[in-house]
Image (tube, rainbow, N blue to C red):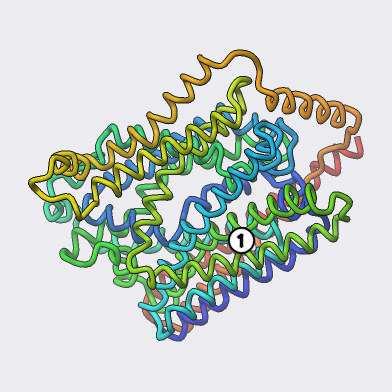
């Protein structure tokens, strides 16, 4: 990277801490620390949820599949959009109606203390392992671009994310996610425009493989896509990082709108996000598919903007990491420290404890990421175990939102049964090097290897759903947890009815968007003045962003004026 690239990266990191500092001024209670005081705009929660799906793995894994197989990568990512739309219709409003502060509070009410412990510690281990691989992947990209030791790269980026999450709480997570969305969109759009402008599309269509434009290919068939939608319906609908965003908005209607925004964006944007590696396949063949995205960007971006590209990749991973840190720090603070250790703790005490938990969890995450290369390919094992737990853990939780019958024993049986069978099939047979060709298990091993994705759907999706349906049919009467939820909802409704406060317009989130647009636009114009290469492109994008920032400011003034008029009348 060049000097302007390094300056761009430093400016981006500085911007994150400016946003975090402003967010910290709003964080005076644990409710604001972990649920943004239930006053987040629906569009900010929707964009934040959208960004939480991104990580460095998005560019490495999906970029690699796009380069190798083509539009099947677009079809797979579109599944997120279908899942989020379904969550918006069926689930998001239901979460907001519950009146709980954290998703863990619901788990404790619905499945008891045993359920809380089982779900919390299982999920904490799962997310620490999964997110650490993303942090490791990001550090690998950094090492490829600049002379820095891998361990120090992990510590550096882990520390940045921990500090801004600790300082600003959920408001910092939401607002930096919005900044990250802006940066990511600007850079990917610039790469796509520059690549398309220099291509002959007819020649491109002839240079890529025949199957390149098919929505399915190889092991990624229609049955896999169905399973992928189902998996992510339960993930978006029940994973705590996403549920937290449904709880952070003012009403069930806004929770639905945030999920619908998330869904619509994932229906229309996957082709846009994956254009660089898709187009790069028509220009260069035979490169490492995992590097296709960054190589495509590097081939067209002017000096200074490659640093913004890496900032975008960092943004994607930072969004995932900060979301998980905040949600689990909230659970440990509210549902363990306050509930079991110090019920009378003041709000300021809980905020301090929440920040301590954020640092501790962040340190554990950084340590795990450092250990990934030392475990010799263990990241593949981690990702495999991660995928086996999604539906078995989340489906019973989501089912418990609507069912009055299933309880904690059903949750544990479903999770352990599905996970154990999946583990035995994958590591006991499919990848077991001890199985010889003359073994009776060898045909089964070949079948599992050739149909790995379909088997994952059968064991990790279909099996737990069938077990849930069976328990729902077999159980008689109402589970005690369902009664506790109904009592909690009735109490919450009475409290809301007794307190009526006017809804006021909070310009904080919109102003953060405005300042982000103005600063990025001004920086691009400055880069255009410094560098001759790509000057017109930089000027064009910079001017557009400044005009967009001015439009946001005009909209803020209009909304403030409208709310003042309404309050006066």
Is residue 434 depicted above or below 461 in this figure? Answer: below
Residue drawn at x 39%, y 38% is: 79
Tell me where residue 27 appears, x and y as whole percent.
Answer: 78, 58
**In the displayed structure image, the side of residue 184 where residue 277 appears, left or right:** left
The one of 559 and 19 positioned closer to us in this rendering: 19
Residue drawn at x 59%, y 55% is: 323
The one of 42 and 405 positioned closer to us in this rendering: 405
Residue 214 seen by the camera: no
**In the displayed structure image, the side of residue 260 where residue 490 appears, left or right:** right
Is residue 280 depicted above or below 472 in this figure? Answer: below
The answer to which quarter of the image holds residue 355 is: bottom right
> Which class describes the residues within 10 Å of circle 1: few (<14), some (14-19), or many (20+)?
many
The answer to which quarter of the image holds residue 459 is: top left
Residue drawn at x 51%, y 39% is: 393
Tell me where residue 256 appears, x and y as whole percent.
Answer: 61, 33
- Which residue in the structure is indicated by mark 1? 176
Tell me where residue 118 appears, x and y as whole percent.
Answer: 59, 43
**In the displayed structure image, the side of residue 249 where residue 124 appears, left or right:** left
Tell me where residue 97 appears, x and y as whole percent.
Answer: 71, 30
| Residue, far left | 438
Residue drawn at x 35%, y 32% is: 226
């Amino acid at each position: 990277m060049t000097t302007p690239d390094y300056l761009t990266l430093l400016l981006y990191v500085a911007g994150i801490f400016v946003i975090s500092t402003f967010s910290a001024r709003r964080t005076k209670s644990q409710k604001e620390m972990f649920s943004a005081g239930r006053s987040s705009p629906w569009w900010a929660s929707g964009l934040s949820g959208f960004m939480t799906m991104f990580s460095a793995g998005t560019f490495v894994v999906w970029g690699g599949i796009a380069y190798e197989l083509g539009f099947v990568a677009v079809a797979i990512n579109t599944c997120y959009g279908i899942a989020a739309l379904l969550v918006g219709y069926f689930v998001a409003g239901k979460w907001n109606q519950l009146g709980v502060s954290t998703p863990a509070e619901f788990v404790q009410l619905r499945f008891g203390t045993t359920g809380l412990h089982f779900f919390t510690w299982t999920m904490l281990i799962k997310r620490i392992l999964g997110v650490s691989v993303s942090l490791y992947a990001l550090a690998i990209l950094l090492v490829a671009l600049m002379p820095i030791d891998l361990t120090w790269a992990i510590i550096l980026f882990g520390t940045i994310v921990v500090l801004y999450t600790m300082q600003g709480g959920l408001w910092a997570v939401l607002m930096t996610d919005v900044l990250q969305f802006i940066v990511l969109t600007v850079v990917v759009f610039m790469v796509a425009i520059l690549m398309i402008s220099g291509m002959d599309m007819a020649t491109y269509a002839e240079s890529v493989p025949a199957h390149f434009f098919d929505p399915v290919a190889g092991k990624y068939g229609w049955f896999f896509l169905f399973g992928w939608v189902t998996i992510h319906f339960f993930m978006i609908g029940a994973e705590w990082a996403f549920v937290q965003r449904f709880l952070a908005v003012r009403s069930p209607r806004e929770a639905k709108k945030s999920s619908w925004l998330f869904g619509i964006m994932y229906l229309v944007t996957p082709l846009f996000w994956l254009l660089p590696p898709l187009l790069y396949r028509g220009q260069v063949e035979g490169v490492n598919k995992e590097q296709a995205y960054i190589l495509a960007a590097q081939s067209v971006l002017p000096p200074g903007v490659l640093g913004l590209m890496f900032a975008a990749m960092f943004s994607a991973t930072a969004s995932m990491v900060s979301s998980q840190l905040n949600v689990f720090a909230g659970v440990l603070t509210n549902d363990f420290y306050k509930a079991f250790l110090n019920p009378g703790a003041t709000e300021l005490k809980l905020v301090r404890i929440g920040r301590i938990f954020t640092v501790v969890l962040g340190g554990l995450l950084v340590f795990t990421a450092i250990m990934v290369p030392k475990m010799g390919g263990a990241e593949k094992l981690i990702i495999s175990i991660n995928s086996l737990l999604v539906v078995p853990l989340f489906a019973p939780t989501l089912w418990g939102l609507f069912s009055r019958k299933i309880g904690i024993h059903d949750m544990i049986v479903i999770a352990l049964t599905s996970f154990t069978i999946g583990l035995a099939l994958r590591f006991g047979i499919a990848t077991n090097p001890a199985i010889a060709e003359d073994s009776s298990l060898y045909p089964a091993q070949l079948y599992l290897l050739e149909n790995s994705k379909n088997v994952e759907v059968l064991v990790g999706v279909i099996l737990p759903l069938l077990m849930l349906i069976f328990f729902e049919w077999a159980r008689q009467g109402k589970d005690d947890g369902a009664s506790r939820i109904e009592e909690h909802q009735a109490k919450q409704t009475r409290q809301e009815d007794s307190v009526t406060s006017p809804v006021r317009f909070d310009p904080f989130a919109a102003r953060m968007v405005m300042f982000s647009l103005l600063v990025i636009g001004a920086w691009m114009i400055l880069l255009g003045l410094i560098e001759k290469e790509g000057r017109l492109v930089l000027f064009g994008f910079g001017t557009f962003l400044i005009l967009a920032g001015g439009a946001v400011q005009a909209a803020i003034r209009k909304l403030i004026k409208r709310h003042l008029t309404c309050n006066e009348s």
